[in-house]
Amino acid sequence: MTSPTYVLVHGAWSGPWCWRDLTSQLDQRGVASRTVNLPSAQTDGDPLADLDQDAAVVADACEGLDNVVLVAHSYGGAVVSQAAHLVGELSRLVFIAAIVPARGESATDVSRLVRVRTTLDEAMVLDGPILRLNPELAGAALYEDCDASTLAWALGQLSTQTLASFRSARTGPDVPVASRYVVCRNDHAIDPSLQEILAARCGERVELSSGHSPFFSHPAELADLITAWAGRPASE
């Protein structure tokens, strides 16, 4: 089998830009990667873009690849869970502080598994069919352990997010591939107690002492964790 390509799937209100530091780390390791741009997280995009549309973009990004590792952050975990069965040459799944819905669950359903209100909940502002983030609270929710320049830059990139994407139920089946969940212990967006529940749905669990966005705050450590299987058989 050829070396894997890591397809990086961002979370809500985000975009390919969030992988800036992680892709640099992967490049240094000689690891191939590509990113996607989810329709649900595009300002001035389709306000009704849902989970299926996001999953289709991920499946399209994997076309022509013969050894795919899907890497999902936050809401991107729901997208990857929906898209996985559409990827013919999928070898592994990596979830980073991610939503991992069971079949029939939406991202909203998953968020209610633990009744803990987070800083991210406080930052959300409903605007018709979309959700915006209060910039005064978004930094503390998403980038709490990032340096000041990264924080300012990332806040300037944030988009809107469609409500439909959170309310769409996963319909895709489970796939028989190895999976790893990275618990972000100091997360203020997806509570670590919820992450522990979701990690139990995956094959193995690892942990980072980071906030919600370790691709900014701990990019080298994160690169090591998501590529740790590179020399191991896909069945492990």
Image: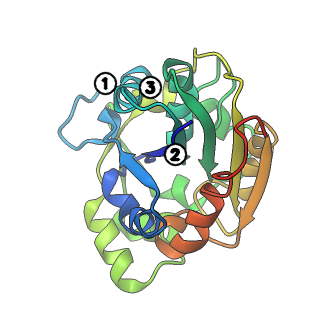
Tell me if I can see residue 91 in this picture: yes
Rounded to the nearest whole Å, what is the CA distance between mark 2 and mark 3? 29 Å
For label 2, the residue is 3
**Tag 1's secondary structure?**
loop
Label 2 CA crowd tier, 10 Å (few <14, some 14–19, many 20+): few
Find residue 18 and report its image quarter.
bottom left
Q: Nearer the viewer, mark 2 or mark 3?
A: 2
Residue reaching furthest to the front: 1
The quarter of the rendered structure image containing the C terminus is top right
Which mark's residue is nearer the viewer, 3 or 1? 3
| Circle number at residue 51 | 3
Lateral position of residue 110 relative to residue 35, left or right? right
Q: Residue at x 69, y 30 (%)?
A: 177
Give the amino acid type for the residue marked by disc 3 in the picture: Leu
Question: Which residue is found at the position 32% from the left and 26% from the top?
Answer: 49
Residue 115, horizontal then vertical, whole percent: 74, 46
Mark 2 or 1, nearer chain start: 2
Amino acid carrying mark 2 in the image: Ser
Instruction: State the CA–CA distance, disc 3 to disc 1.
Output: 10 Å
**For numbered disc 2, what is the local secondary structure?**
loop
Q: Which residue is mark 1?
A: 48
Q: Earlier in the sequence, mark 2 or mark 3?
A: 2
Callout 3: few (<14), some (14-19), or many (20+) C-alpha neighbours within 10 Å?
A: many
99 relative to 118, above or below: above
